[in-house]
């Protein structure tokens, strides 16, 4: 199967330096070097050469680099096909699960509304929260899995799937355990003055764009550092390594053991709910309608 460290090789080769590759991958240059050393050790091949002019691939590295993208695509397709074959003969709902989009909220929902689907089994399908690959995972709704439960006001996500909103999560901040703000039970916006706040780049999330505009207009004392549009573990790692402050949400408080999540005195929140395919089959749509109906009944009762 495709080795995830090949992503590091591709970045190093394209950028020509560990520093630039680190910026692209959103990890430290030291982490890039360690990953390259690990990949070379794993393959027992010398892949890169270092010189005053920069970094270039060896002949072996050129071969691996050339085939890496093919390997990545073929491996993902192979795994997805194997999983779909395994469960094709069963009456099953497949539910995606990842570190940032865990299946537990779906399970809680399922056990409230599953009486009409007593013949169905649930199968959890893991996937990675890779900021470069998450959109391809969203596009697999209806193929790799039937449902995802997660936070969503992303224009890119919503252009690729349907979304049933079920509620909101509060926006919070995360800091390293050694950060002075980690001792607070609640943070005021002025406590962030002089800090660097990491948040997603402008343009994809209405909620985050609104927060950015408010901070830049009324609180210019807070520096803003752009992250990729979609968080993955590398963003949380960077927060822990740099001592910066990370804009996060309440359901991610346990994502990184080195970070503490702290509420902020503001009213910002972001919608969460069920994501499913634009071309969902009848049974998926039936479950969605069941949830809609019962949620509506509970709200009016």
Image (cartoon, rainbow, N blue to C red):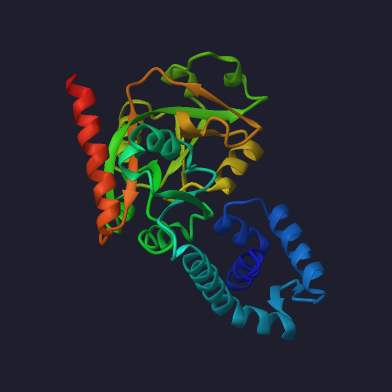
Residue 204 visible: no
Say whether residue 176 is left or right of residue 140: right
**Residue at 44% in and 65% down:** 89
Q: Position of residue 90 (x, y in %)?
A: 44, 60
Q: Residue 75 at x, y = what percent?
A: 57, 72
84 to 64, vertically: above or below: above
Instruction: Single out the residue that lies furthest toward the left.
Output: 300
Q: Position of residue 82 (x, y in %)?
A: 53, 69
- Quadrant housing residue 32: bottom right
Q: Nearer the viewer, residue 189 or 177?
A: 177
Residue 215, above or below 75: above
Residue that protrudes farthest toward the top in the picture: 185
Please state the total of marks drawn on the protein image.
Answer: 0
Quadrant hosting residue 142: bottom left
Residue 77: % across, % down? 50, 72
Position of 47 with respect to 101 (left or right) is right
Give the residue displayed 49% in from the left and 51% down from the top: 123
Residue 33 image-quadrant placement: bottom right
Nearest the eye: 158 or 31: 158
Which of these two is toward me, 92 or 174? 92
Quadrant position of the N terminus in the picture: bottom right
Above/below status of 194 relative to 233: above
Q: Nearer the viewer, residue 298 or 233?
A: 298
Q: In which quadrant of the rendered image does the C terminus lie?
A: top left
Q: Is residue 7 visible?
A: yes
Residue for point 32% across, 26% down: 218
Is 202 situated left or right of 33 in this image? Answer: left
């Amino acid at each position: 199967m495709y080795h995830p460290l090949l992503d590091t090789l591709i970045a190093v080769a394209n950028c020509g330096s560990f520093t630039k590759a680190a910026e692209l991958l959103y990890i430290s240059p030291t982490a890039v070097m360690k990953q390259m050393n690990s990949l070379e050790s794993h393959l027992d091949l010398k892949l890169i050469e270092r010189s005053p002019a920069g970094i270039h691939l060896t002949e072996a590295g050129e071969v691996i680099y050339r085939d890496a993208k093919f390997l990545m695509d073929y491996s993902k397709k192979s795994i997805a096909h194997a999983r779909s074959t395994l469960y094709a003969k069963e009456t099953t709902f497949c539910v995606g699960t990842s570190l940032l989009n865990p299946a537990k909220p779906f399970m809680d929902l399922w056990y409230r509304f599953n009486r009409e689907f007593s013949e169905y089994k649930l199968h959890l399908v893991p996937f990675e929260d890779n900021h470069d690959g998450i959109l391809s995972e969203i596009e697999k709704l209806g193929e790799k899995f039937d449902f995802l439960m997660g936070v969503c006001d992303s224009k890119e996500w919503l252009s690729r799937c349907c979304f049933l909103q079920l509620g909101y999560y509060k926006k919070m901040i995360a800091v390293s355990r050694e950060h002075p703000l980690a001792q607070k039970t609640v943070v005021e916006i002025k406590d962030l003055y002089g800090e660097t706040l990491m948040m997603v780049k402008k343009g994809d999330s209405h909620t985050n764009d609104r927060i950015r505009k408010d901070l830049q207009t009324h609180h210019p004392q807070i520096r803003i550092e752009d992250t990729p549009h979609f968080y993955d573990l590398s963003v949380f790692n960077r927060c822990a390594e740099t001592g910066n402050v990370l804009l996060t949400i309440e359901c991610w408080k346990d994502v990184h053991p080195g970070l503490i999540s702290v509420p902020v005195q503001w009213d910002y929140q972001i919608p969460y709910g069920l994501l499913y395919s634009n071309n969902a089959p009848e049974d998926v749509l039936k479950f969605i309608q069941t949830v809609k109906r019962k949620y509506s009944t509970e709200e009016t009762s």
